[in-house]
Amino acid sequence: MNENAKSMGIIESRTFNLAVDNIDTDQIIPGKFLTTTEREGLGQFCFYSWRFNEDGSEKPDNPLRQHQPGRQRVLVAGSNFGCGSSREHAPWALLDYGFQAVISSRFADIFCNNSLKNGLLPIVVDDNVLEHLLANPDHAVRIDIGNRRLTLDGYGDVGFPLDPFSAYCLTRGIDQLDFILQNEQAILDYEKSA
Amino acid sequence: MSEPSQAASTLFEKVWKRHLVRNETPETPAILYIDLQLLHEVTSPQAFDELKRRGLGVRRPECCLATIDHSTPTSPPDADGTRHYITEQARAQVDVLHVNCAEHGIELHGWDSPNRGIVHVMGPEMGATQPGMTIVCGDSHTATHGAFGALAFGIGTTEVGHVLATQCLLQNMPKTLGIRIEGDLEPGVTAKDVILHVISAIGVDGGTGSVIEYHGSTVRAMDMESRMTMCNMSIECGARAGMVAPDEFTFEYLKGRPMSPSGANWERAVDEWKKLKTDPGAAFDRLVEIDAADIEPSVTWGTNPGMVIAVGSPVPDRQDPGTLDALEYMQLKGGVKLAGEAVDVVFIGSCTNSRLTDLRAAASVMKGRKVAQGTRVLIVAGSEATRRQAEAEGNFKGRQGSGVRTVLASPLTAAASAITGKVTDPREFLGGAA
């Protein structure tokens, strides 16, 4: 992973496609894995029921087998990604699996919030852009977080919405907790005065 | 918004301002200092794990209070002390909380504590919840604590970690929504009916992005348990929190509780708490006025808590998809009364209605009467303290269960429905058996 590029607010990657609508959080990480008490390593359960049979053997038609870790750090998925029950395990699992951003034409609100809190960037594009990406696997893309621009190699570039604080954190390569920790002096001052 | 005078503030604004570590900017949210974090076994493990991963400690363990309440079986242990958890992971969550609390020096009320209970019942019972505090918990019904004039947010696991590590929470400034309720409630009408009425009046998204302050003579006349029931359900209309200004009822409730201030500190605390009210002339971003006389015993007829009717009224006969879906799910016909529908299971409990006053209210209706044949009644006290007291007064016991088609109602309406085996207006049974 190119941490320097990420910290400057640029993600350059190839895409990986899951051309399915309504991928819910239970598909992203099945409920039976939620009772773990750690968040590290959840990538092994990411899209588990697509990848594995009940007995743990790999499914012959596992779509993730085509995924090239490291090269493909941007997931492209059908509409309404992340619907279903609210669980922060979903972005944790996606991040741990190696994705930095997800592109879709629509995201569930709670998934969006949970992702941004955890440093996973959801990018909303219109149906035309999504269709183009889904029709062209392993697409080269460049994401400029600060300017909220998504550039598709050989297609053009489009804007995407991103709230100011998420952009603030993502372009600095920090998460929300880092931001609070950077305000240590203000917290100490408050504690002294309270 | 009209122009309020410089000094006039709402209750929310006073508590917010006192806890500001850093103001909101166009790019960054406000940093708010948190006085008390309530912890339980489900939403805390990953937060502790994240701290460990980053090499961070718990900033102020004395500002945390933990209990086990979500994954714990409500059935008593076997003779040899074995407890039957629903899954091994549930047992693991409880074990991990014990380890984390011991490691970080956090007070935990586990199986052996006489104070253990639903986190939102236990906090007030112990006097941990106090006026003017900022309180968080990784549970959506944390708004309950607002009944004491605290600002209480339900948060996710990521924020649980933020508060453990820094004692701070990131928040964009909410809007203020005043809900003013005036007049006397009719006999048989309870706080649960009031809040169901409020939610149906403003809609399940009517409170989105807001902190609600409930006020007016109806609220002033409510006991603390009633105020907790109302604040508890604030999130069901999308609000971030609900609050009631503290008054003599609040102080009376808190006096002498294990964690309440005592001696000279008590007087000082009460003097401070008395300042926690919305000033005359302070304006809410939005104000909704409700006449208490319009509120009847209420029930939900559909699939969200905004689908509310008076218990004796017909369910809506509309053709919009939302209504049709809900009617189909509930197997009801539009325009037909819900009252009289058969009830298989009556559950009195949950974090909204498991306090002693709730159980007493249900008992007042059931006294001298029998549960209808074919109807099962489950009553779960919200804490060990409530269970002991209720068992001393009557003989409540039970365990949690869940229904498929659920009707939300007050403990009175639930008890009346248990007697008849049908959805029933409790006013038929007021005053005990003839």
Image (cartoon, grey):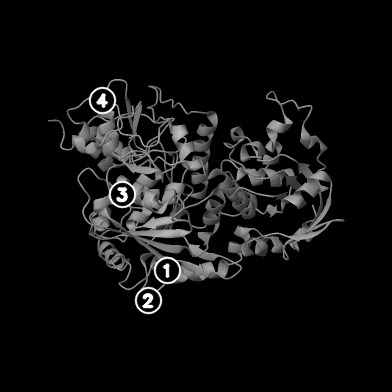
Q: Residue furthest right?
A: A154
* Chain identity of mark 2: B
Q: Marks 3 and 4: CB-CB under 8 Å? A: no
- Residue A156 coordinates in the image, percent (x, y): 82, 59
- Judging depth in this view, the residue of A60 and B306 nearest the camera is B306
Q: Quadrant of residue B409?
A: top left
- Judging depth in this view, the residue of B136 and B186 nearest the camera is B186
Q: Quadrant of residue B390?
A: top left
- Residue B341 coordinates in the image, percent (x, y): 33, 29
What amino acid type should be assigned to the residue bearing mark 3?
A: Val
Q: Quadrant of residue B28?
A: bottom right
Residue B206 shown left or right of residue A58 in the figure: left
Badge 4 is on which residue? B371
The N terminus of chain B is located in which quarter?
bottom left
* Chain identity of mark 1: B
Of the numbered discs 4 and 1, the one sitting upstream in the chain is 1
Badge 3 is on which residue? B194
Q: Is residue B65 visible?
A: no
Secondary element at tag 3? helix
Q: Marks 1 and 3: CB-CB under 8 Å? A: no
What amino acid type should be assigned to the residue bearing mark 2?
A: Pro
Residue drawn at 41 percent across, 68 percent down? B13
Badge 2 is on which residue? B4
Secondary element at tag 4? loop
Distance from Cα at disc 3 to Cα at disc 4? 26 Å
Q: Is residue B93 visible?
A: yes
Distance from Cα at disc 4 to Cα at disc 1? 51 Å
Badge 1 is on which residue? B18
Q: Marks 2 and 3: CB-CB under 8 Å? A: no
Disc 3 vs disc 4: which is toward the camera? 3
